[in-house]
Image (spheres, helix red, strand yellow):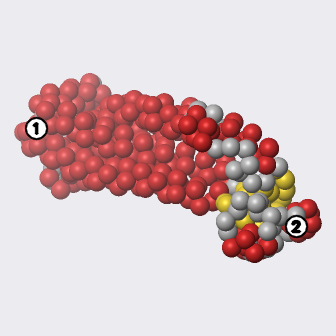
């Protein structure tokens, strides 16, 4: 009987405040969708950082006959002795895990392969425009400054290019997107909590006669509050279910597309998506339940 009474009270509350309930569910769904999207982007950024941190390398371009840097103009093209000495010094550095020498022909072929979909750029570049170089893999990505400063200005060295500067800009963009989504989500969650509290307050006020009778017959505070708490929890659960669709769409239509554009081989599994969905739904239920409980303590006066 008690369970049947609680269910009937929940149904009465949802029916009397249908418009407000729909507004709560919509606000919670939007909030959790943004929150879950931010968590998903955060996981993707973390995975990509780990992937690229293991692949950050320095490219040391050597002087050629057409190099225009001051060092190359003063010392001329890199000699075999320059290359041998540079490679030996690099291999002795503790910050370096591997060194690979790339000839001009190999560098030209690699350039054609990387930019095969940009025919105009490939046609505008001729063999010999890209100098021979050393590709240096680092043991610790944070030590690229030490290696870079050690080789810059040496005889035969034209320029030093590092992947870190490019990746920092890219990850800065993703971090900005992540924090923007989380900030908007927090604002939306705060708005959802206020709206939930107002809805529960109106529901409690509209049923003040029933709750008064329940108090007179000796019903406990928890028994009187339970239908209102369950109303909030159900609204949070439904909002979380709707938000889960947006989270799945974020994974397939945003994150996977970004990887296709940049040819990243770091794809989040469905386990990560289910984890984010679970966290978002739990947050939605807790948020609505806690907001309902705090509102009832203030307005129900039981």
Q: Which mark is residue 178?
A: none
Residue at the (32%, 44%) spot, across then down: 31
- Judge left or right: residue 6 versus residue 143: left
Total labels: the figure holds 2
Q: Nearer the viewer, residue 214 or 288?
A: 288
Residue at the (45%, 31%) spot, across then down: 253
Q: Secondary structure at mark 1?
A: loop
Image location (x, y in percent) of residue 154 = 79, 73
Q: Nearer the viewer, residue 186 or 211?
A: 186
Residue at the (80%, 57%) spot, across then down: 134
Image location (x, y in percent) of residue 189 = 30, 49
Image location (x, y in percent) of residue 283 = 39, 45
The residue identified by callout 2 is: 82
Answer whether labels 2 and 1 touch (C-beta < 8 Å): no
Q: Nearer the viewer, residue 141 or 26?
A: 141
The residue identified by callout 1 is: 207
Answer with mark 2 or mark 1, whichever residue precedes in sequence. 2
Q: Nearer the viewer, residue 264 or 229?
A: 264
Q: Residues within 10 Å of mark 1 (few under 14, many from 20)?
A: some
Label 2 vs label 1, nearer the camera: 2
């Amino acid at each position: 009987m008690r369970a049947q009474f609680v269910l009937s009270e929940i149904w009465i509350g949802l029916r009397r405040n249908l418009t407000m309930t729909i507004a709560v569910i919509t606000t919670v769904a939007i909030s959790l969708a943004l929150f879950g999207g931010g968590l998903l982007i955060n996981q993707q950024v973390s995975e990509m950082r780990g992937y690229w941190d293991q692949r950050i390398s320095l490219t040391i371009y050597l002087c050629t006959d057409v190099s225009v840097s001051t060092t190359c103009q003063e010392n001329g093209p890199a000699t075999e002795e320059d290359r041998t000495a540079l490679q030996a010094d690099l291999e002795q550095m503790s910050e370096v895990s591997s060194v690979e020498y790339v000839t001009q022909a190999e560098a030209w072929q690699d350039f054609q392969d990387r930019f095969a979909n940009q025919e105009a750029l490939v046609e505008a570049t001729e063999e010999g425009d890209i100098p021979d170089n050393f590709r240096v893999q680092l043991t610790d990505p944070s030590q690229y400054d030490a290696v870079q400063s050690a080789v810059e200005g040496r005889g035969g060295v034209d320029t030093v290019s590092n992947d870190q500067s490019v990746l920092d800009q890219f990850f800065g963009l993703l971090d900005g997107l992540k924090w923007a989504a989380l900030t908007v989500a927090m604002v939306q969650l705060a708005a959802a909590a206020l709206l939930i509290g107002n809805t529960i307050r109106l529901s409690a006020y509209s049923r003040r006669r029933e709750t008064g009778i329940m108090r007179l017959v000796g019903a406990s505070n928890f028994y009187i509050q339970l239908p209102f708490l369950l109303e909030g929890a159900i609204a949070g659960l439904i909002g979380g279910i709707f938000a889960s669709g947006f989270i799945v769409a974020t994974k397939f239509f945003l994150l996977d597309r970004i990887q296709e554009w940049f040819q990243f081989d770091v794809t989040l599994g469905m386990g990560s998506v289910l984890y984010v969905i679970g966290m978002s739904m739990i947050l939605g239920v807790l948020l609505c339940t806690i907001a309902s409980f705090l509102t009832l303590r203030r307005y129900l006066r039981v």
